[in-house]
Image: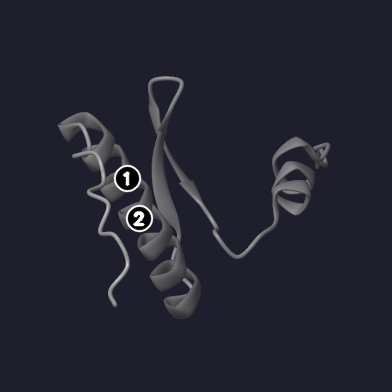
């Protein structure tokens, strides 16, 4: 005997789009790590290149490290 088939609620279009965008971003990060290339983000009105292979704490150390004055 087969169990009851429950129909899932049809997902809202915006929910599906959000899920697809998150999945695409995750795939882009994976590919960028494989090929050792930066990812580009829109941040504070500027385009910023980030290295996806750095962890968040390592990225903060690189970004906020004191600059050596020569």
Q: Are marks 1 and 2 in contact (CB under 8 Å)?
A: yes
User: Going by the picture, which residue comes out furthest to the top?
Assistant: 45
Residue displayed at 76% across by 53% down: 58
Left/right placement of residue 40 relative to residue 67 reads left
**Secondary structure category for the residue under label 2:** helix
Residue 62, percent across and down?
73, 48
Residue displayed at 69% across by 40% down: 63
Q: What residue did someone put label 2 on?
A: 23
State which quarter of the image contains the C terminus. Answer: top right
Q: 10 or 23: nearer the eye?
A: 10
Residue 4, percent across and down?
29, 60
Give the tally of numbered discs: 2
As drawn, 5 above or below 22: below
As drawn, 24 above or below 60: below
Tell me the quarter of the picture where residue 28 sits. bottom left
As drawn, 1 above or below 66: below
Categorize mark 2 by other alpha carbons within 10 Å: few (<14), some (14-19), many (20+): few
Circle number at residue 62: none
Q: How is the image coloured?
A: one colour
Q: Distance between the Cα atoms at labels 1 and 2?
A: 6 Å
Residue 12, percent across and down?
20, 31
Residue 26, percent across and down?
42, 58
User: Going by the picture, which residue comes out furthest to the front?
Assistant: 1
Q: 15 or 53: nearer the eye?
A: 15
State which quarter of the image contains the N terminus. Answer: bottom left
Circle number at residue 19: 1
Residue displayed at 39% across by 27% down: 46
Categorize mark 1 by other alpha carbons within 10 Å: few (<14), some (14-19), many (20+): few
**Secondary structure category for the residue under label 1:** helix
As drawn, 50 above or below 12: below
Residue displayed at 43% across by 78% down: 35
Q: 70 or 68: nearer the eye?
A: 68
């Amino acid at each position: 005997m087969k169990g009851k088939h429950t129909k899932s609620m049809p997902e809202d279009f915006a929910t599906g789009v959000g899920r697809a965008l998150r999945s695409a971003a995750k795939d882009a990060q994976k590919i960028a790590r494989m090929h050792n290339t930066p990812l580009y983000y829109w941040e504070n009105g500027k385009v910023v290149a980030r290295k996806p292979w750095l962890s968040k704490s390592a990225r903060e150390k690189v970004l906020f490290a004191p600059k050596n004055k020569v």
